[in-house]
Image (cartoon, grey):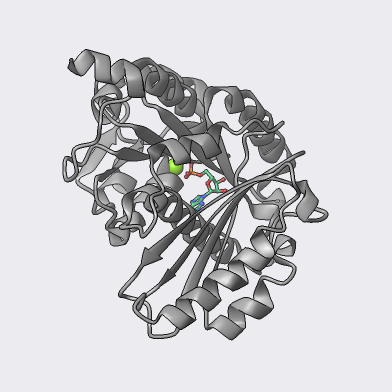
Amino acid sequence: MEENLDKLFDYRPLIPGSGRFASIVGIGGGAGRVVDQMRKCCLPDVQLYAFGMNRKEMDELSLCGKYLIGQEGLGSGKDRFLAEYECSKSFPAIESVLRGRLVAVFVVCLGGGTGEGCIRSFLQKAREVGNKAIILVATIPHSSEGAEKRKNALGLLKALEPMADALYTVDYDDSRCATLTEVFQEADRKIIEFTDSLLGMVLRRCMITFDFNDFRTFLQFPTPSKHIDFFMLVGSLDFLRKEVKDWWKKLPAKYSSADEVAMAVFSIENADWSDDKETTEAMDVVHERFLQLPPDAEGKWGIYPDETLPPHQFRLRVFTKCKR
Ligand SMILES: Nc1nc2c(ncn2[C@@H]2O[C@H](COP(=O)(O)OP(=O)(O)OP(=O)(O)O)[C@@H](O)[C@H]2O)c(=O)[nH]1
Ligand SMILES: [Mg+2]
């Protein structure tokens, strides 16, 4: 019977509280630090892990699920091939953190030996153990770190795309921050917001159901690239009304108008859903704009209560996939 159910849904129903919805795995020094900061997100049924080659960096993480790749703990010496070789010895640990999860999210900061050398093996293992949604979150090094480094990272990203179901990237050259430290901080925040928001669409208490199949429909919606774009707004109704006017301008430049949107998923949140008038107004604001998607585009949405938001404040999260 259980086997039949498994075939019907193509995944086992999630047992709430089992911690088995998703594994988020940071690979390499920078990515490990990003995932370490995700501890504050507190999504249920999500487990956090870091894999790295530098013992000192790993010791600084507060995560419980951390694994050293290789015996030495001295780093990869920027050697992608050494990292790849050492990573093969960690396959049992990699399988153990991925097995039985519906979703695998891999965070990697491209430009370093460990992340670049190991990411391919992690993506392969996720497929092998049967994760149903495989998401790659990657940062692209800044030009000031070296043109060669950046070119290699972009080439690798292209090669990795077929191995994932969806991609979210933060390109450091797009940042307006003045220092590299600030660029990294901004990227950390974006990655945490994106990951928390995307998994939260399924995991947070929702007024109308947005389930794992809605989630997969979005990831699998056929577009030329697997990239997902994302932005988030928090403010009063008046603020939202103003901000969502030309909402597609908040997306990357490849969206020259809302017509470029192939599919959009959005959530609206506020603390008090008992105030029907304000809630309906918020829905109207969002409907007016987002349902003006091109006729061939698809839209899905969810409404979520969030008691941590101040009264009369709304949070809008928007995910899109582009026709180009
Ligand atoms: N967002 C973010 N990016 C970082 C951070 N530290 C480094 N980076 C970026 O990540 C790239 C790779 O650096 P690491 O993550 O240290 O590299 P690694 O995968 O550990 O590989 P090796 O150190 O070469 O073994 C760098 O080129 C930077 O662009 C960080 O703390 N946050
Ligand atoms: Mg490192």
Residue extending furthest right? 256
| Image position of 156 (left or right of 80) | right
Position above or below: 303 against 165: below
Residue appearing at x 68%, y 29% in the figure: 155
Residue appearing at x 52%, y 80% in the figure: 235
The residue closer to the viewer here, 36 or 198, is 198
For the N terminus, the quadrant is top left
Percent coordinates x, y for residue 79 in the rendering:
51, 27
The residue closer to the viewer here, 218 or 37, is 218
- Kindly tell me whether residue 313 is visible in this rendering: no
The residue closer to the viewer here, 323 or 297, is 297
| Image position of 293 (left or right of 166) | right
The residue closer to the viewer here, 184 or 37, is 37
| Image position of 104 (left or right of 255) | left
- Kindly tell me whether residue 304 is visible in this rendering: yes
Number of numbered labels in the structure image: 0
Q: Quadrant of residue 62?
A: bottom left
For the C terminus, the quadrant is top right
Q: Quadrant of residue 86?
A: top left
Residue appearing at x 53%, y 23% in the figure: 163
Percent coordinates x, y for residue 10 in the rendering:
36, 21
Percent coordinates x, y for residue 76 in the rendering:
43, 31
Percent coordinates x, y for residue 159 in the rendering:
63, 23
